[in-house]
Structures are given as structure tokens and as C-alpha cells.
Amino acid sequence: MVKNPIPPFTRQSAEEKIQLAEDAWNSQDPIKVSKAYTIDSEWRNRSQFINGREEIQKFLTNKWENELDYKLKKEYWAHSENRIAVRFEYEYRNPSGEWFRAYGNENWEFDDEGYMRKRYASINDVPIQESERKLL
């Protein structure tokens, strides 16, 4: 099965792929999100190394149990034939009620069928007040 859009990417198809990813992550559905990645997908998320859909699902389940009221915005940075770079920010509150905004960059690599086989994310969290939220 093909996961459109597929490489080689144009600016338009890269932006479409980014929007699809943003929508999926904002669903906070670990199974839905994991289906965009290859079975053996490789991730680096902050200092964690995650391999394969099963680990992705476990990671995302834990993430959204601890990052409440999660809201994400992704932005196009660059692309090549089968790679896309994005800038993103998201906001969440932890179980103690403290709010954060996370900023970061991701580098994505896709297989020929449009599934992401590599995702490398660098992320920094900044404490914010609830009144400072931008992503409502």
C-alpha cells in the first residue's frame, strides 16, 4: 500500500506531507500515527532511540499520557527527493498542571512508498504560563 504523497517531493507535496503529519499527531492516536512509518522505522527523539512501529506506539502512548492538552504546529523548512526538514512547536501541560512550549527540528527520510523510515528530532522545552499559550 502507498502512503501519499510519495517521493520525489515537490514543495507542494512536501507541505502536504507535513500537514498530514501535523493532523495525525494532533489526533493523539498512537496507532494512527505509527502507520505513517515503516515497520522498521528508526527514530531519535531527544536522547531516545526508538525502532519500529511497536516501540513508536509505546513511546507515543506514554508521551500523551504525560503531555496533556497537546497541540502541535509543524512548518516546512526544506526538502529534497525523499527527505523533508521541518520546524515545529507544540504546547502541553504535565500531570502537575505546569505548561510548556516545545521547539524543535525534525529531519525525515521516506521510502519509495511514502512511509517515513527515519525521523530525527531535536527538541527543547520552555516553561510557560497558561496565559502565554499560542496554540489553542
Image (cartoon, rainbow, N blue to C red):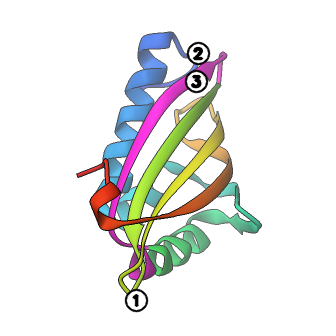
Q: Given this view, does label 3 or label 1 mark the residue nearer the observer?
A: 1
| Residue 69 forms part of the magenta stretch | yes
Q: Badge 3, how many Cα within 10 Å: few under 14, some, many 20+?
A: some
Q: Point out the image quarter for the N terminus.
A: top left
Q: Is residue 112 above or below residue 30?
A: above
| Residue 2 visible here | no
Q: Which residue is mark 3?
A: 77
How far from the left and from the top, in percent, is residue 32? Answer: 36, 59
How far from the left and from the top, in percent, is residue 114? Answer: 52, 33
| Residue 94 visible here | yes
What are the residue bounds of the magenta stretch?
64-82
Which comes before the other along the chain, label 2 or label 3?
2
In the rendered structure, find residue 8 and report the number of the disc placed on it. Answer: 2
Q: Given this view, does label 1 or label 2 mark the residue nearer the observer?
A: 1
Q: Which residue is mark 1?
A: 96
- Residue type at mark 2 is Pro
Secondary structure found at label 2: loop
Secondary structure found at label 1: loop
Dots 1, 2 in contact, CB < 8 A: no
